[in-house]
Image: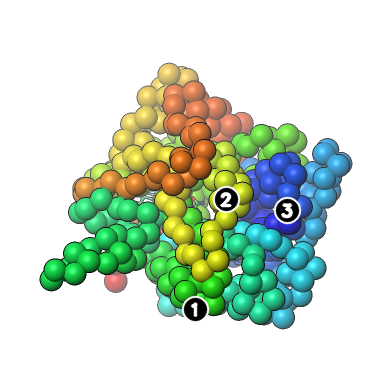
Amino acid sequence: MKVVVIGGDGYCGWATALHLSQRGYEVSIIDNLVRRHWDLQLGVETLTPIAPIQQRIQRWRDLTGKSIDLFIGDITDYDFLIKALHQCEPEAIVHFGEQRSAPYSMIDREHAVFTQVNNVVGTLNILYAMRQDFPNAHLVKLGTMGEYGTPNIDIEEGYITIEHNGRKDTLPYPKQPGSFYHLSKVHDSHNIHFACRVWGLRATDLNQGVVYGVLTDETGMDELLINRLDYDGVFGTALNRFCIQAAIGYPLTVYGKGGQTRGFLDIRDTVRCMELAIANPAEPGQFRVFNQFTELFSVGDLAVMVKKAGIAMGLNVDIHHIDNPRVELEQHYFYAKNTSLLSLGLQPHYLSDSLLDSLLNFASKYKHRVDENQILPKVSWKR
Ligand code: NAD
Ligand code: USQ
């Protein structure tokens, strides 16, 4: 099966492109490499030294004999997108190619506008390209658990059945996102749902939780295939940041009370979820929503787990509760369903002491690359 991975030079996209290629899919990558540019602008670098995309793909071919086609360009440019898609003729379009940092989207007006234009226009262009020339392709789109926010009731997978004044309907689950980035995902979801309903397109929205870890079977095969691992205050995410902080003896940065609870998953499960979604496509006209995470943790609990694993390895780990730069509930109810991917066969990797050991060891190996000035959050949600 031919699959195009948009955003295939990024953290989830690179791991997914290699995984699908290894499993026999014919993979093409579309990416404008803008993420590397944002790192330069912000003066940050991934913990791991990542090779240029052309070298990565060449190394993959040398090692496995499998080739991956590369199209460098911006999906907000419709002409580029449609030409690239015609060269790949995809049966599945996997879309990771967005600005994905909540703090980046909250820097100022320009970054909020950029995030929403980049994300919403990119996805709209894909929908129009599908309508025009690829109506049978299956769109597998990365959404986020953060679309739902933290409601005081259980979170369903995309839809909720409501009874109101004696009548009943199944409707999109209410959304209360926590940043202009998370809002861009809500806008995407609405646009995709509409396109499925009106044009009969098929799509799966994967509301993914926070991803952790770095090695997959494929990216661990060679140093040149290594994946990015962000630890800075803009693009670094909670658990990855905590492990890197522990490795360098920096107090773990829990924001506020630390009761913020989120869905989490190992990057090895991200790649497997993508494979499962592609292998079991949505029906024509169907807008399917899966919640893609394996475990729920509060950030405070994660910090305690990292501290325990770090101390067992002889590291000096402390936890600091710092002023929360975001506006979010710090103690709340949170329970979300995630049965769809499990019923398709996902066998989760659960966060265990051994995984924390290996992440901490991995972070220790590259700790000489950490710039401590990039750890504390500098972007505030408040006025
Ligand atoms: P990333 O920043 O590492 O990768 C995104 C890639 O998309 C980059 O290589 C970037 O250059 C490319 N891109 C961005 N805009 C583009 C455009 N207009 N045209 C072409 N390419 C473009 O991000 P990631 O962590 O791999 O996340 C991938 C997707 O998964 C995002 O949509 C994100 O919202 C979602 N997601 C990520 C996480 C996580 O914890 N990392 C969790 C939930 C959902
Ligand atoms: N947090 C800390 N300390 C830190 C970093 C974060 O306490 O050092 C807290 C945040 O305040 C927040 C939670 O941890 O409550 C998660 O923050 P995060 O930066 O790990 O994740 P988030 O901003 O939500 O975004 C990440 C990805 C995004 C994806 C989202 C999934 O960057 O692309 O959509 O995770 S979810 O969180 O489920 O919406």
290 or 60: which is nearer to us? 290
Ligand 1 closer than 8 Å to label 3 CB: no
Point 44% across, 31% down: residue: 351
Residue 179 on image: x %, y %: 37, 65
**Which amino acid type is marked by label 2?**
Asn
Q: Position of 257 compared to 28: left or right? A: left
Q: Earlier in the sequence, mark 1 or mark 2?
A: 1
Q: Position of 253 compared to 141: left or right? A: left
365 or 60: which is nearer to us? 60
Q: Hey, which quadrant is residue 226 in on the image?
A: top right
The quadrant the C terminus occupies is bottom left
**Which residue is identified by label 1?**
198
Q: Residues within 10 Å of mark 1 (few under 14, many from 20)?
A: few
Ligand 1 closer than 8 Å to label 1 CB: no
Inspect this view and state whether residue 218 appears. yes
Q: Which circle marks residue 1 in the picture?
A: 3
